[in-house]
Image: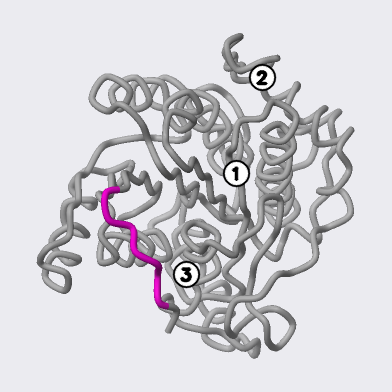
Amino acid sequence: MYDVPDQTGKLVVVTGANSGTGKETAKRLAAAGARVVMAVRTPAKGEAARAEILSEVPDAQLEVRRIDLADLASVQDFADGLAADESHLDLLVNNAGVMHPPTRMATADGFELQFGSNYLGPFALTVRLLPLILAAPAPRIATMSSGAAYLGKLNFDDLQWERRYRRMPAYAQSKLADLMLSNHLAKLSTDQDWGLRSVAAHPGFTRTNLMAAGSSLGRERPSALVRLGYRLNPLPSQGVEIGAEPLLFAAADPAAEAGAFYGPAHRLGLVGPTTVVRNPKTATDQAVNARLWQVSETLTGVALPSILRK
């Protein structure tokens, strides 16, 4: 198991920290000495996860705060609240997301749910928190993408899937956008001399509730066909302890490189120890990354503060 480097004295925000890779990441960063803000949509679930972590790591410093990444007003409230209480933020871990809702659903601001929750919400959170992050001695952002990013395409004429919604390509687009966000942040840091390390990761095929939860949105439970598919899936998979390690490496390891992408090393990139993996071609296109950033600023109404622009 990956040994997280000492995080004593660091303040960390982990989104989606009540379950899956987010909870594992919060637990292991806290066990390494970090003070962790568990940013969750449902505080009761966050408190339950906090209690579970404390039962394993009694000295963990954990705080639950509410954020709904599908609601830009909630994102602003979270960022404003954190800035009011803290002088700096050492690490932001963009982990939360949704996967494969069966029908097109919308966020509070009218965006397609996967693009809004997985990308536009984290984009707005990241930009709003940047002044706080850059006030840290060694600022860092780790963003969870997905192997689905390799299949992703950006259709700038229909980013919200209003013409024909397809849940899997919509998910792939959102996770490609996350990777592009991470890479563009790394370039901005170099261009603007921020000293920020922005790193991306993907978990391979990790057994969490993400697929089941997404497939049941708008329904009481996933369909019988979806449930059967989960049981009979022949692909290799791994537990959350290993699945969270590429994100932990991106978040904490001194060897993680800005603009790099980390994931599992074995069996189609689905399982195994962490290694550097290839960026999809689109995610390395600086012009397309910059265009997506500009579109995102327009859609969210959130832009870099002038003080961060040279």
Q: Residue 203's mark?
A: none
Residue numbers of the magenta segment: 3-9
7 magenta-colored: yes
For marks 2 and 1, give the one nearer the viewer: 2
Instruction: Using the image, determine if residue 182 lies above or below residue 116.
Output: below
Q: Label 3, on which residue?
A: 244
Instruction: Using the image, determine if residue 48 lies above or below residue 77.
Output: below
68 magenta-colored: no
Q: In which quadrant will I find the N terminus?
A: bottom left
In percent of the image, x 47 and y 66: which residue is there? Answer: 212
Closer-to-camera residue (217/300): 300
Total marks in image: 3
Q: Label 2, on which residue?
A: 297
User: Counting residues from the N terminus, which is met first, the one under dot 2 or under dot 3?
Assistant: 3
Q: In which quadrant will I find the C terminus?
A: top right
Q: Label 1, on which residue?
A: 114
Percent of width and height locating residue 239: 44, 81
